[in-house]
Amino acid sequence: MTRTLADRLTDYAAVAASLGVDAVALVPGPNFTRALNHSFMSHERPFLLVIPARGAPAALVPNLELRSWDLVGFEGAVFDWRDQDGYDAAFAALMTHLGIASLAVEGQVMRVFVHHALKRAQPDLRIIDGEQAISGLRMIKTPQDIAALQAAIDISERALARTLEGVRLGQTETEIEQALIQALFAEGAEDLSFAPIVAAGDNSARPHAHARADYAVKAGDALLLDFGARKHGFAADITRTVFLREVSDEGAAVYDTVLRANLKGLEVARAGITAHDIDDAVTGVLEASPFADRIRTKTGHGLGRDVHEAPYIMRGNLMVLPAGTVFTNEPGLYDIGNFGVRIEDDVLITEDGCRALTAYPKELTVLPC
């Protein structure tokens, strides 16, 4: 059943009540898009949606966005402003209209100048960071969310197959990266989830490497690709590591260790488990191997409208994961100056276990190239 705008805004009103504040404020970003079912840019112009615990919502909208705002179907008060006049008067009018004393904001998204504008309009306004509760509404995915994620993942996997078919010794990392990006859009991506990571040889040991224009891939290299397509507002996040032409005994052993850790994550994930327990099981496999000194990252993170969102799959995070949670299962081992291996799946937690939304093969692959 499709939820209406009023239904979605009611979720944020409930968050405000649960946090003991008068209202929640959203700015352009993933929560804004979830609430409105429309996407708006974050730029130098402040744009604000305020949902009170009780009463009608209100919005502060740049005048040039009004015609786009009309498409939202918003029925609350709207305070617009023009570049020529500045936005302080609009903030003052908004706060006078709302008559609130406290406000929860997105601590990881709201920019400082918007916070300052709120305080200029109402110096005694109490502002708290409600990021965890606000973004927590996105943790349990709806069937529509999962369908959008699956579409993004399917595009990504088709693009990966197309890219790997074209890899040849002597290509640079940037040439392979460009081929991957072209394949993503050719397969139907609306945008990139993030700038892809394409790293070979010693560069693959850097978890967040940048492709090099001056490195030509060679036989024996590990080639790591971490990337994703964005579709219907949702982001895929996939990593596969392959070897070019040949693989050393060390490379095969490291790969087998990472694969076993990845499979352990799929084995233990289920509704009711904690993020700590998943990471503990996965990392435990890596720690029990001869390569424990190559562990550099946690197991993963939540995935949805944002590439990195709650829950964060790490030891110490005792958050219980309900059915409908989607997370990345991405163990890796990285030997600086040598090579790295990461295998990443996107995983949906279900009542009786989990389901990998990614289906691209994970067995050790040596490209003939």
Image (cartoon, helix red, strand yellow):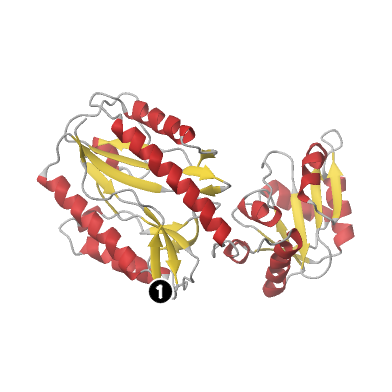
**At which x and y percent is residue 291?**
18, 55
Of 222 and 1, nearer the camera is: 1
Residue at image coords 24%, 37%: 202
Which quarter of the figure has residue 338?
Answer: top left
Whether residue 129 sits left or right of residue 80 in the image: it is left
Which quarter of the figure has residue 64?
Answer: top right
**At which x and y percent is residue 283?**
29, 63
Q: Measured along the vertical axis of the image, is residue 357 above or below residue 86?
A: below
Residue at mark 1: 352
Residue 51 can be seen, yes or no: yes
Q: How many marks?
A: 1
Q: Label 1, secondary structure: give it.
A: loop
Residue at image coords 24%, 29%: 217
**At which x and y percent is residue 74?**
80, 53
Q: Amino acid at mark 1?
A: Asp
Image quadrant containing the C terminus? top left
Image quadrant containing the N terminus? bottom right
Of 256 and 315, nearer the camera is: 256
Residue at image coords 47%, 32%: 186
Whether residue 250 sits left or right of residue 339 in the image: it is left
Q: Measured along the vertical axis of the image, is residue 287 above or below residue 197?
A: below
Q: Measured along the vertical axis of the image, is residue 197 above or below residue 133?
A: above
Q: Residues within 10 Å of mark 1 (few under 14, many from 20)?
A: few
In this view, the residue farthest toward the left is: 249
In this view, the residue farthest toward the front is: 1
Residue at image coords 27%, 50%: 362
Q: Measured along the vertical axis of the image, is residue 260 above or below residue 176?
A: below
